[in-house]
Image (cartoon, helix red, strand yellow):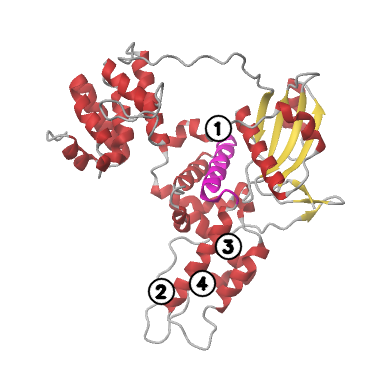
Amino acid sequence: MPGDGPAAAAAALTPLPPAVALAALRAYARQNGEAALPLLEGLLLDAAAAPLAAAALEALGEVPAPRAAALAARWAGEGTDGAPDESGAPGATGTRETRKAARRALHRLTQAGVQPEHRPRPAPAPQRERPERVRRALMSAADAEGTRLLYLLIDPPLGGAQMARVIASETGGLLRFEILDSTGRQFERYLTTSRPDRELALAEIPPAYARWLIGQAVAAAQAAGRPLPPAYLSFRDSLPSPDVEPVPPIEDEPIYLEVRYRPDLVEQSVELLELPEFRMWLPDQAAVAPLAEEWRNVDSGPLSLPPMVVGQRREAILDRIIDLITGPGGVPGARRRLEDNALVLLRRGETQAARRAIAAASRLDPDDPAAAHSQPLFRAIAETAIEALLGPEATAPPQPAAGEEAAPPPAAPAAPAAPDTPVEDEPGMRRRPSGLILPR
């Protein structure tokens, strides 16, 4: 570790991969103990060293000193009002990643018997906690509109347990809410042997997350002026939406942190289009049709455009189709749907596919929506949407004119995907290829 202070350490560690920088800081903290705190505090206070903040907070867990525990508690936001203290360290500010790192360090120190110098006064416990009415919750993968199937086992305040079969959509609202009398054993038996959509893989999720998904669908229905299913109105008090948006369940899996910094998996994410969980991610053909017509007419004008200009104009059209793909909630919503699908893939044993979905989600920065335009999976979906209307030859590179160089080939080929063609199921209903049966 350079001996010229935090600036030199930041200059040496920033170019390294995050896992290597974290290992170096933890080793330095273990070897030097409390003497390592000035360097770690300097990295936290130096704005130029912001990429190393999470690693520096993780390293605090290797210093068994009350001062290290106090610093970790402040960055974790425990017992503070968000204002900086005398050392300049913030209270409950920072990113989700730094707060998680600080909490992990504080947990390790607490297990070692180290407490902060000034332990905050514990918040008063609520007089009465609202009981959780959802005993179990399972979720299917989401399509591009955020539509997914939920199975809930609910214990209402009065009466016996009830099973709810719910189709919730971030775009269409609460499309279905069916209730059946059930017990825990009947619920398990129905899921494994009797449900009509057994081709859909399900993943167990926290009850609060299921209530939040239903709350989002209810909000979408109310915003669009659509009615809510009568059965839901009878159980609305048992399914309150959480006050705070919950963390996606995939973030609690060890695999989540392992693959976030894997560019190779991001490039391989185009292979996800071969899986049933992603075949429904093509945008609506009616919305793509005008853009496909623009695509067709780019090089059909009276003037012959250079291949580079044709390529640039078609890249702009792909960017507009990707904006359609991100769908409800924009980039943050698309990232959450990718992470939820990764959880379903992980639960049905598709570990490598789950890694690719997590890596593809990590490429989506909620603070930089334009980053989605370069995401390989979304570009493959956009090209597939064009091909579904104009044919596979439509996305072939333009041929150069005489004396011109050919345009470089695309970074990743488009993976084939089945179009979202409804199949007639019963009067007034339609069945999607994913297996969901929706009202017409």
Q: In front: 64, or 397?
A: 64
Q: Please rate how many residues cluster around mark 1, counting C-alpha atoms within 10 Å: few if below 14, some from 14 to 19, many from 20.
A: few
Tag 4–tag 3 contact (CB < 8 Å):
no
Earlier in the chain: of badge 3 and badge 2, it is 3
Q: Main secondary structure of the magenta part?
A: helix
Q: Is residue 88 left or right of 405 when viewed as pictured? A: left
SS assignment at label 2 = loop
- Visible in this render: residue 214? yes
The residue lying at 69 percent from left, 22 percent from top is 133
Check the image and report above or below for 201 versus 223. Answer: above
Which SS class for mark 4? Answer: loop
Q: Secondary structure at mark 3?
A: helix
Highlighted range, magenta:
328-349
365 with respect to 26 (left or right): right
Residue 333 inside the magenta-drawn segment: yes
Residue 81 in the image, given as x and y percentages of width and height: 40, 26
- For label 3, the residue is 384
Point out the frontmost of discs 2 and 1.
1
**Residue to which mark 1 is pinned:** 244
Task: Name the residue located 54 percent from the left edge and 42 percent from the top edge.
Answer: 336
Q: Is the Cβ of the residue at disc 1 closer than 8 Å to that at disc 4?
A: no
> What type is the residue that disc 2 sits on?
Ala
User: From what the image shows, is residue 78 above or below residue 417?
Assistant: above
**Vertical side of 7 occupied by 180: above or below:** above
Distance CA(mark 1)–CA(mark 4):
46 Å
Q: Nearer the viewer, residue 224 or 409?
A: 224
| On-image quarter of the N terminus | top left
For the view shown, which residue lies furthest in the top direction?
113
Mark on residue 407? 2
| Residue at the farthest bottom position | 302
Question: Which residue bears the numbered disc 4?
Answer: 396
Q: How many marks?
A: 4
